[in-house]
Image (spheres, helix red, strand yellow):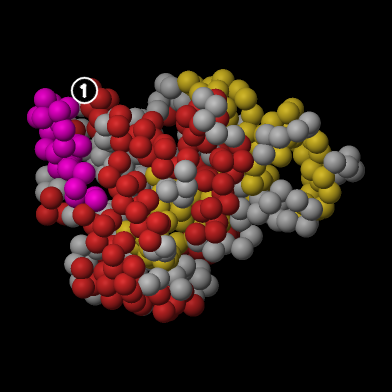
Amino acid sequence: MKTLIKNVRPYGEGEPTDVFIEDGVIAAIGENRDADETIDGDGAVLLPGLVDLHVHFREPGREDTETIVTGSQAAAAGGFTAVFTMANTNPVTDQPVIADSVWAKGQAAGLCDVHPVGSITQGLKGEALTEFGMMNRGDAGVRMFSDDGKCVTDPLLMRRAIEYAAGLDVLLAQHAEEHRLTEGAVAHEGENAARLGLRGWPRVAEESIVARDILLTRDYGGRLHICHASTAGTAELLRWAKSLGVNVSAEVTPHHLLLTDSVLDSYDGVFRVNPPLREESDTLALREALLDGTIDVIATDHAPHGSEDKCVEFDHAKPGMLGLETSLAIVSEIFVRSGLADWRFIARVMSERPAEIARLADQGRPIAVGEPANLTLVAEKDWTVDRGQLASKSENTPFNGMDFSHRVVATLLRGRVTSRDGQACAPANA
Ligand code: DOR
Ligand code: ZN
C-alpha cells in the first residue's frame, strides 16, 4: 500500500511538502510519487501520532458507555495512535488474561494501539500486589501499572510495589489522593465549594501522596509517574524531585489546564472530575510547569460515563470527563494560538515524551524517512464541539458548545488512515 500526503508542514515548520508512505513506513519526503491513495493536507501541520498515557475504555464491564472499538475510534478522531487504558474495568485488569484480551481486541480493530495498564493491587482493593511479571510477559507486554481511580495509600504496599516495579523496569502510575482527606468530597476545597455547599477535596490530599511517593522513589528506585497533577503545589514538588534527580514523570489533563471550579455554579454533573477542577492560580502554575518540563506530558484521562451517572445531582454524579476528541484543539488554543509555544512543543508533550515514558519504540518517532508512519494532521479550522457528533459512545464532554480554531483532520497508524475530518474510520474487522 502506497499513500501520499500532499501539502503538509511537518511540525508546522517551513513550506508545505509531500510525505510518501509505503508499507507503513515513511519512504520519502519532498517527492511526489505515484500512490494508491492521496490525502491533500492543504497546508495542515503534520505531527507524530499522539500518545495518551491515561484513558478509560469501559470494556470489560461497562460496554454501554465505551468499548475498545468506540474508544479506539475516539482516539483516532482525536489524533492518537497509541493509548494506555486504565485497569479499573470490571473485572479489574489484574491478570494476564484480561490484559491480553484488551490488547488483542485493540489490535483486531486496528485503529489505535490499545495498551492495557495492569492494576497494582488485586481487584484495586489496596491489599495485595498483582503479578506484574506475568502481565509484563504476556501478549500485551504490560509496561505500566496503576490503581487509577483509587490511590495506593498504604505506604508499605507502595514501597513494595516500587521495589517490584524497579526490578522489572516497569512504570508505576499513581493516582495521588489521600482518601482519608477526601471522604465525601466532590469539588475543590475553596470559596466556590463553600458557597455552593459542596464537600471539599483539599490540595493536600494530592500533594501529601506526591511528596511521599517521590521520597519512596528516591530511596527505592524505579520509575514513578504522577497521574493528572492538579495543583500548583504538586508542580512545586515535582520541580524539587527533578532537581534531586528522582526518576519521576507527570501528566496534566487538558481540563485541568483550561477549566476552574468557577464552572461549578451550574451544579452540572458534567464538571465533576477526580481530582477536581481547581483555581486559576493552579491552572497557570500547571501551564508553566508543562512549559518548563517539570510536568512531562498531557494525558486526557478520557473517562466516559452514561447520562444516568452524569445527569444527576452533583453529589451523585460519577467523576470523569471525555477527553480524546477535544484535547489537541484545547492544547493548541492554550499554547500555540496564544504564542506561548510552537508545534514542536505539542509534538513533545503529546507524542514524543509520552512514548519515551512508556518505552514505546515505534511511537513518538521523528517525521523522517525510514520511520513508522504514525502521523496526525492538524488543520487551522473553526469548529464547535457537539457532544452528539463524537465517536465516543458517551457524551460527557465539559467542552460541548465551545469553539476552537484547530482540528485533527487525519490520523494514520502504520500508514493506514484511521480518521478523516474528525470522523473515525470503521474498525479493520468490521
Ligand atoms: O474523574 C475520574 N474518573 N478520575 C479517575 O481517577 C477515574 C475516572 C473514571 O474511571 O471514571
Ligand atoms: Zn485518576
Relative height, residue 337 to residue 158 (above, below): above
Seen from the viewer's position, the closer of residues 376 and 168 is 168
Any part of residue 206 in sight? yes
Residue 117 x %, y %: 41, 62
Instruction: Say which quarter of the image contains residue 125.
Output: bottom left
Query: What residue appears at the point 68 percent right and 34 percent down from the top-left corner?
Result: 12
- Secondary element at image label 1: helix
Residue 218 x %, y %: 34, 68
Q: Where is mark 1, residue-wise?
A: 265
Seen from the viewer's position, the closer of residues 140 and 68 is 140
Task: Mark 1: give few (<14), some (14-19) or many (20+) Cα within 10 Å.
Answer: few
Relative height, residue 185 to residue 99 (above, below): above
Residue 267 x %, y %: 20, 26
In the picture provided, is 295 more to the left or to the right than 347?
Answer: left
Seen from the viewer's position, the closer of residues 381 and 366 is 366
Q: Residue furthest front?
A: 243
Instruction: Say which quarter of the image contains residue 162.
Output: bottom left
Query: What residue appears at the point 57 percent right and 41 percent down from the top-left corner?
Result: 345
> What range is drawn magenta here?
185-207
Q: Which amino acid does label 1 sit on?
A: Asp
Seen from the viewer's position, the closer of residues 97 and 157 is 157
